Image (cartoon, rainbow, N blue to C red):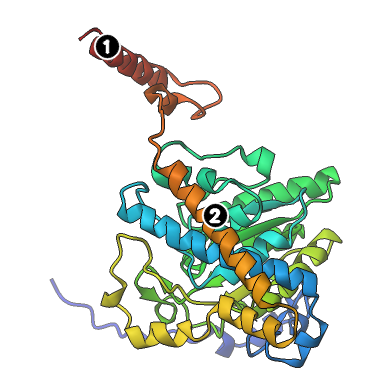
Amino acid sequence: MKKSTMTVQPAQPVQDLPGAAAYRPTPPPAWRPRTDPAPLLPDSEPYRVLGTDAADRLDAGLMRRLYAELVRGRRYNAQATALTKQGRLAVYPSSTGQEACEVAAALVLEDRDWLFPSYRDTLAAVARGLDPVQALTLLRGDWHTGYDPREHRIAPLCTPLATQLPHAVGLAHAARLKGDDVVALAMVGDGGTSEGDFHEALNFAAVWQAPVVFLVQNNGFAISVPLAKQTAAPSLAHKAVGYGMPGRLVDGNDAAAVHEVLAEAVERARRGGGPTLVEAVTYRIEAHTNADDATRYRGEAEVEAWRAHDPVQLLERELTERGMLDEDAISDAREAAERMAAELRERMNADAVLDPMDLFAHVYAEKTAQLREQEALLRAELDAEDER
């Protein structure tokens, strides 16, 4: 067969074709920015209060409460970590070093508001008033969750990354439609910002102007993956601009600063101003969980540098220098923390009385045929065991 000798000419760019200029009108208004981005941009440096002139306006009562909760939180983390080593907990993701974020998130909310925690946020739930043992029930493997979310206004601790964020948006949007004066505060780690649920939640929240606050605890690592391998954004707070909401960058180890920024964001949401994304720059002092070897991906010098920026010590030093905290108050906070730890040990060392049939409770509103079949099979096996 004779080959064709036809030469193929390269295609002309559309903009170079005759008359192309007539087809390049000014973009319609919908292409223009819907929002002025300038007010949405975060500060170039994390916002701080402790050690700055802003500390002159500190509320002494609030600061002492923050301090007491930080001390209790630090002891709670240490005791829960010890319980994993004793086999009383299956796993515990410690928030040691992040206590300022945890406590501030709990204290800025009113009773009617909702907290949506991740698996690392047991301390936030306890600071909000949840029984310390109930906060650990899921991590112990005893129950789907250890508390009634409706009673405490705390969603179940969320193990899948970022799936609690759309739930928070849905609840906040529903409350707004009903006219309820409710704000949802959703907590997530830096790793969770790489999930699709993060994008979907922020996009819907901004479009609906839902009364929700997103708190990203940027603790440096998604297990072993450093933030630099997750995103090239100037900061995680900058991501807010793309969704049309304000982004705030705060020192996550400065309890006063985190509380102030979150309180402003909650108030803004409550009065109809819509959502806010807050990035708290902090650090995970302990390993990801008791199953993780953090020495494989970070050095001790890095950890020690962050220990020098410890949230408990920062607040204690500031309040002591300003005469807001004395030795008696420090001693009282530590003693209260030890009493909490002792009670937690005692209650967690008691074997739970469990009913295997509870596996089938609260899975579906109406049990499926497959679930009923599995339930009947387990019941028969248990009955046979009893007969033997």
Instruction: Tell me the residue that label 1 is attached to.
Output: 386
Classed neighbour count for the residue bearing mark 2: other residues with Cα under 10 Å, few (<14), some (14–19), many (≥20): few
Q: Is residue 354 left or right of residue 85?
A: right
Q: Amino acid at mark 2?
A: Arg
Q: Nearer the viewer, mark 1 or mark 2?
A: 2
Instruction: Tell me the residue that label 2 is attached to.
Output: 339
Quadrant position of the C terminus in the picture: top left
In this rendering, is residue 379 above or below 356?
above
Picture coordinates of residue 377, whole percent (x, y): 31, 16
Question: Which residue does the image show at 61% across and 47% down from the upper left?
Answer: 130
Question: Which residue does the image show at 62% across and 77% down from the upper left?
Answer: 237
Residue 357 or residue 329, whichever sits in front: 329
Question: Which residue does the image show at 62% across and 65% down from the upper left?
Answer: 333
Q: Amino acid at mark 1?
A: Asp
Picture coordinates of residue 4, whole percent (x, y): 23, 78
Distance, label 1 to label 2, CA atoms, is 41 Å
